[in-house]
Amino acid sequence: MADYKAPLRDIRFVLDELLDADQHYASLSGTEEFNQELRDAILEEGAKFSEQTLAPLRQSGDQEGCTWSEEGVTTPSGFADAYQQFVEGGWPGLSMPEQFGGQGLPASVDLVLSELLGQANHAWSMYPGLSAGCRETLIAHGTEQQQQDYLLKMVSGEWTGTMCLTEPQGGSDLSFLRTKAEDNGDGSYAITGTKIFISSGEHDMSENIIHVVLARLPGAPEGTKGISLFIVPKFNVNADGSLGERNPVSCGSLEHKMGIHGNATCVMNFDGAKGYLIGKENEGLKCMFTFMNTARVGTALQGLNHAEVALQGAMAYALDREAGRSLTGPKAADRPADKLIVHADVRRMLLTIRAFSEGNRAFIHYLSQQVDKEHRGSEEQQKEGSAILAFLTPIAKGFMTEVGIEAASHGIQVYGGHGYISEWGMEQNMRDARISTLYEGTTGIQSLDLIGRKIMADGGANFGNFIAMISKDIATMDAEFAEPLQAMVKEWAELAGFIGAQAGKSMDEIGAASVDFLMYSGYVVLAWLWGRMGTLANAKGTDDIFYKGKVATARFYFDKILPRTESHKATIEKGADTLMSLDDSDFEALAAL
Amino acid sequence: MADYKAPLRDIRFVLDELLDADQHYASLSGTEEFNQELRDAILEEGAKFSEQTLAPLRQSGDQEGCTWSEEGVTTPSGFADAYQQFVEGGWPGLSMPEQFGGQGLPASVDLVLSELLGQANHAWSMYPGLSAGCRETLIAHGTEQQQQDYLLKMVSGEWTGTMCLTEPQGGSDLSFLRTKAEDNGDGSYAITGTKIFISSGEHDMSENIIHVVLARLPGAPEGTKGISLFIVPKFNVNADGSLGERNPVSCGSLEHKMGIHGNATCVMNFDGAKGYLIGKENEGLKCMFTFMNTARVGTALQGLNHAEVALQGAMAYALDREAGRSLTGPKAADRPADKLIVHADVRRMLLTIRAFSEGNRAFIHYLSQQVDKEHRGSEEQQKEGSAILAFLTPIAKGFMTEVGIEAASHGIQVYGGHGYISEWGMEQNMRDARISTLYEGTTGIQSLDLIGRKIMADGGANFGNFIAMISKDIATMDAEFAEPLQAMVKEWAELAGFIGAQAGKSMDEIGAASVDFLMYSGYVVLAWLWGRMGTLANAKGTDDIFYKGKVATARFYFDKILPRTESHKATIEKGADTLMSLDDSDFEALAAL
């Protein structure tokens, strides 16, 4: 397996050159002094931890997996030690407010760190990853006392957190939620029910685990309007902050799954466990969206991470392995074969992986600057950041994870038969990647969010603003990128209009077009970023191999990836007819044949 | 996990209605009496064995895997028993010549059986599957004595076979081959070397294993012109046919791999093992193509099988699981949610899987009729069958396996988070499927074979014949299929011409266009078959739900799948420039950054 190497050069390019981090942080409140030197120090240390401590546990963690017993869940060898080092290094509190013991850095820094952690070890990175959503919920909706009781130790990393939403009878559909919360009369509630698919739900890495749990109060309205949010600690916390008695919440079993074996995916049983209401009664869903949005950006990031892992693995192999001859004649006449890299089709796969890895990197760090603006910007910046974030999050989550899986699959393909063999790490990367289009809302759910909530709900106003913004960028791009992109952006708006008009005929037209439209949107967003990167790199001068590679990849993206939009467009224009011509009962009859 | 149900209705449609099996078998020599009643009996019995004996071992075989010890390899519980039943049922000799103890049925019957076996249990089906290639090699190139010594017991199934090609230092590139064969002076050779990726290389299912091995004689020409083919039995065979001493050929270790865990993928060590030359010295590669062609058709079949498994699983779940509401309003107002099947995007995935499963079925059984024609036809039929088979095999192998993996992935996606959990069987299906674009020649290798050997080598003559043949079919199709297909076939020929012209500029243009062209070709071939099926089903009348489903799927294919050709066309037309603009050394420099 190729050793993981943190892609610092490209991260710096994206942050410092493409996204002008100096200017970005200078424009926000409280981050004016967060300069390149400081950022580099964090990058270097984060790279060291990821490369030296986490990456060596990627494969062993997959092979060993997690182990369940009555006493609890044991994570793979080395995982708990690595987490201890992570806590000692002060990493958990990087972007947390100083008032809670954090270092007060902007959220975007956490995302850079998450990139490194997730590339080195997806399964491990989910333990601190889940804590992040839990902490944000407490910051946004917890009382001062709750923050005092639970947040401080999660900021230090001594405690970790989870998000407990899903139940056996309903996945993404929370209307099925049955877990109940009964008032104990002492300010606490008794939480009873079963949750499934709880990532990092139980483990041996921290002394306490804080669960954020969706449940129903007695007499609450049916459906999603009757859901409240509760804190349920694994160990109750005494008034002095010390750990009290064990709360009756436990892991009933671990799921056996395709990948991310190092992460404990738990069935969690709540047997009258003590819980504390967060936010108002029956407003749990609103509170939950705080961490859902964070989780979706965090999952989008995984689409970058699996592409990066595939890139490093496939590049190393293609430059080393000899097989076949260049179609233009031997390149290494003294050897029995040429290296894989000489083959146009191998290059097609490598450049596809690269285009998605580097394109996704630009996308996700652009997004995380919008989070910064939301948190620390002027009123106008906040408004702008929120609007862009709302529009781009479903595209990022849906598109980046889909192409991340594609990239992981190309990573296998470059290796030929060896790609299927575990020792090279490419098959694990694809198994790990495959979860990313499923959890935190499937691609289908993201695509309905995009068309319904993010475009149609405001009559396309926000979508129009985004197009106006990128049109300004396009005006500054080299013609080779600007021209095709301009045409595509126009077509993008027309397609949205077409779908809106179709919806008048039947709402099924939206569902029928949704995923094609989301993917179309993703290709356009990446084209916008590749156009910017290609233009920038061209200006820097292609004598530098880094910029030369960037320009070549930008051109490859426009030539060889962007034409995929043509199929999505044609498919959208065919509408819903052939999807809806069979009745539900026809499908039943067909299945029974 | 959904129980496997042999898709007999659709198999019968393809064989009896689409491909007119009665007429087909009547036109060949020795199969005139192979009527529908006989075929149905075989289908029913094959279905019973596959559903009741093999399918229950699919998941347990994956979880248990194979175990290596000094004494040999143990297959998962139940595998050896199932094989014993298979032998007792007389299945191995179904299509083998009667002179070798077979039942003398046409090869196409074996493919029907292979469909059932492979859908029920991919890993298990590879044990008899590998024997098939080995047997054909002996029939085509073995001496009478070799056939007497080895073939009879392989036809009965008492012994199994393998094909030992790949070595550690070179995968598909056989120029690296080092295994040596030294003349023992007694008609035998001493074979020494290491082979990897040997499927079914060692196991506990049969009393002897016959390896067909590529090796070099001393002084043989370098590269692929100096390769000979040998039989190396696990146990030497005495003159009276009884088993003699153990030959020094053994399994050094098992590969850990993404899927097909129930099949033993072996490193095989030959330590001066006794071997016997098949065919002429240094003509091993020519002999090998006998089983390579069989193996490629057999692997193409897997693209159908994984799609069928995905279809059965995803249909069952979509018809049972409740989640969300139809965008047009509640369909099951008395329930908290509608079934998944109401959602247009879920139907898009289901119909995509169905279009590939049923389309691939038509493709593979059409192909296997060409094999029958090659084996048993008039001179003219032989010529025609061979020509079609040569042209279509790389398309079938490349395209069917690529879309088979896509279908398997949709199978996961329909299940949402549950798709990632092992118990539902969808993630195993994708892990099992992922090998199919790698072994027996990657998609890249198939696509170079298609353009180079199958189109350009004869100046497109055979390609032109194929187009002429399907054009006759198009003339008989309903206009809704005929019109788009006619246009597409014209474009297909133009694209081949374009690539040929580009090749004059640089041979890299062929490599750059190859996979896009192969995929384009696959979509056209499937459109031809879907056009035929849609027309036929329309004529039969859509009051019958089977035909109604067929027509709906045909229309879906034309509307929603066929537009993918537009992207492939656009990508091909962009040529090789952006793939080749970086030097090999640039890639090295980029990897070193």
Image: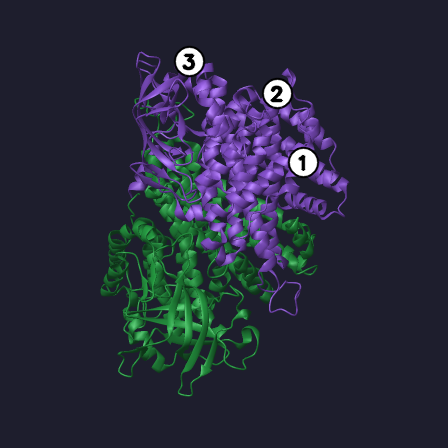
Chain colours: A purple, B green
Q: Nearer the viewer, mark 2 or mark 1?
A: 2
Q: Position of residue A125 (x, y in %)?
A: 49, 37
Residue A94's tag is none
- Choose between A351 and A217: the one closer to the eye: A217
Q: Vertical placement of A261 versus B148: above or below?
A: above
- Choose between B129 and B16: the one closer to the eye: B129
**Point 47% across, 50% down: residue:** A427
**Local secondary structure at mark 2:** helix
**Local secondary structure at mark 1:** helix
Q: CA distance from mark 2 to mark 1?
A: 32 Å
Q: Residue furthest top?
A: A185
Residue A280's tag is 3
Q: Vertical placement of B6 versus A503: above or below?
A: below
**Point 51% across, 28% down: residue:** A294
**Point 38% across, 42% down: residue:** A66
Kind of residue at badge 2:
Arg
Q: Vertical placement of A406 versus B365: above or below?
A: above
- Circle 3 chain: A
- Circle 1 chain: A
Q: Position of residue B383 (x, y in %)?
A: 47, 69
On-image quarter of the C terminus of chain A: top left
Dividing the picture into quadrants, the one containing residue A305 is top right
